[in-house]
């Protein structure tokens, strides 16, 4: 059951919608707390979860055949979190989504929500915004490996979320940036020792 605070929160996100438009979504939404270390979405899961992180941090990762644990993405406050495999491709999740910190989010069952979205043009437009944002973030990440050096990727992440380096272990950040932890340490050292302009 949503609290008055939860309802205010949703009205803040979906500013263009009336309470009536959101009523059906409210009935399906639930506040969820995930302790640090707990898994939000298991690899192989098929449930279509869509979360909006209010507080905390979630890491999507997988273990490669060679045993390397690779970070696909990090999601933090005011970002949506979902398995694109289940939501867009209707396939089991290839990744594990795990809380790195105690995390609070608002969760919707996207499978149940789709019927409501289909019958309400205003809500349907928000679905498109969410899915386009997920696609845009995936493309931006892919393009960064083509267009930017590892150091530029590091600086971009630092600009987007300055405190991320205090919240996430270096080994996870390194795989997110496509480099080794040693290379990440060298980049950080080089940047801190660079003369100030």
Image (spheres, rainbow, N blue to C red):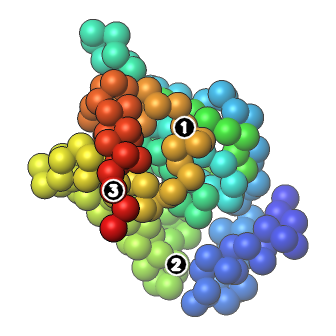
Pointer 1 or 2: first along the chain: 2
- The residue under label 2 is 123
- The residue under label 3 is 195
- The quadrant in which the C terminus is found is bottom left
CB within 8 Å, label 3 to label 1: no
Determine if residue 130 is in view. Answer: yes
Which secondary structure, mark 3?
A: loop
- The residue under label 1 is 168
Q: Is residue 152 left or right of residue 184?
A: left
Disc 3 versus disc 1: nearer the observer: 3
- Residue 108 has which mark? none
Q: Residue 144 in the image: state x and y as whole percent.
A: 21, 53
Give the distance between the C-alpha atoms of the residues marked 3 and 1, in whole angstroms: 27 Å
Furthest residue to the front? 195
Q: Residue 178 in the image: state x and y as whole percent.
A: 27, 35
Which residue: 66% across, 68% down?
Answer: 25
Which residue: 68% across, 59% down?
Answer: 54
């Amino acid at each position: 059951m949503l609290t008055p605070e939860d309802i205010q929160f949703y009205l803040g996100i979906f500013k263009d919608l009336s309470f009536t438009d959101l009523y059906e979504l409210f009935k399906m939404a639930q506040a969820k707390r995930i302790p640090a270390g707990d898994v939000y979405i298991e690899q192989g899961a098929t449930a279509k979860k869509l979360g909006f992180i209010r507080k905390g941090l979630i890491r999507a990762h997988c273990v490669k055949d060679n045993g390397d644990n690779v970070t696909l993405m990090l999601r933090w406050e005011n970002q949506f979190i979902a398995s694109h495999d289940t939501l867009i491709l209707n396939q089991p999740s290839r990744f594990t989504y795990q809380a790195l910190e105690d995390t609070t989010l608002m969760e919707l069952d996207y499978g149940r929500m789709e019927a409501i979205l289909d019958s309400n043009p205003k809500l349907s437009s928000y679905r498109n915004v969410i899915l386009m944002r997920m696609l845009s973030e995936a493309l931006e990440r892919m393009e960064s490996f083509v267009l930017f050096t590892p150091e530029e990727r590091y600086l971009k992440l630092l600009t987007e979320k300055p405190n991320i380096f205090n919240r996430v272990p270096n080994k996870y950040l390194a795989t997110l940036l496509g480099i080794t932890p040693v290379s990440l340490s060298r980049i950080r050292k080089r940047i801190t020792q660079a003369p100030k302009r």
